[in-house]
Image: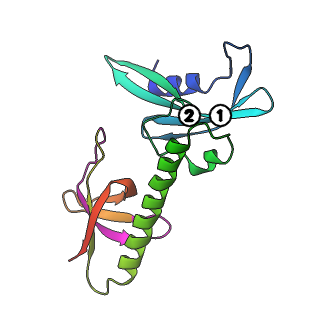
Amino acid sequence: MNRTETIHHVLEPFTDEDGDRNEIITSVLRANIVWTLWKKDENKSYIAAYNLSFSNGVWTFERQLESNPPNQVNCPISYLTKAPVLCYDWRKKVEEHFERIIGIRTEIRKKFKERGTRTLRVFLTPDPGYYVSVDKLDILCVYPGIEGRSLEDGKRYHVPIRHVSDMQYL
């Protein structure tokens, strides 16, 4: 299966070992993780992450449920209110991750507004296992999204907030 087929496969309804029907409520792809919110029968819901990986020309996936929490914390925050809590510690990490993202985004917007004639530069450091194509961007605009221009290739990029490690005026 190619990547698209693998994603479609993990989103297909299925019957679990208890004989309960599981159907997708919503899903989102973030990097190589498909975050899903499932409905089990009519009255239960749960969160699952599907970690996609590519090896030897084949896409595969690993399914992780909140009950045995995923290592990743970029689950959509809205999913947390739509499924019962199965792991408080993991949910706290997800909430802290989003608080950090909101804080960085707010700081970039504030500094951009106060920059005057200076240039605001952000520095990017990817998390382990991630790759960013550039390591610094000069901020061009902050609404609706934050965008910057690369010094290396002159191209315009969306700023991956989770990888911002520092910012400074030039």
For the stretch drawn in magenta, the main secondary structure is loop
- The answer to the question of whether label 1 and label 2 lie on touching residues, with beta carbons closer than 8 A, is yes
- Looking at the image, which residue is at 42% across and 40% down? 31
Mark 2, secondary structure of its residue = loop
43 or 5, which is in the foreground? Answer: 43
Mark 1, secondary structure of its residue = strand
Q: Which residue is mark 1?
A: 46
Q: Residue furthest right?
A: 42
Residue 34 screen position, x and y as percent: 51, 35
Residue 28 position by quadrant: top right
Which region is colored magenta?
Answer: 129-146
54 or 130, which is in the foreground? Answer: 130
Relative to residue 47, is residue 21 drawn left or right? Answer: right
Give neighbour class at mark 1: few <14, some 14-19, many 20+ (Cα, 10 Å): many
Q: Amino acid at mark 2?
A: Glu
Q: Which residue is mark 2?
A: 66
- Looking at the image, which residue is at 28% across and 43% down? 131
Residue 65 screen position, x and y as percent: 55, 29
Q: Quadrant of the C terminus?
A: bottom left
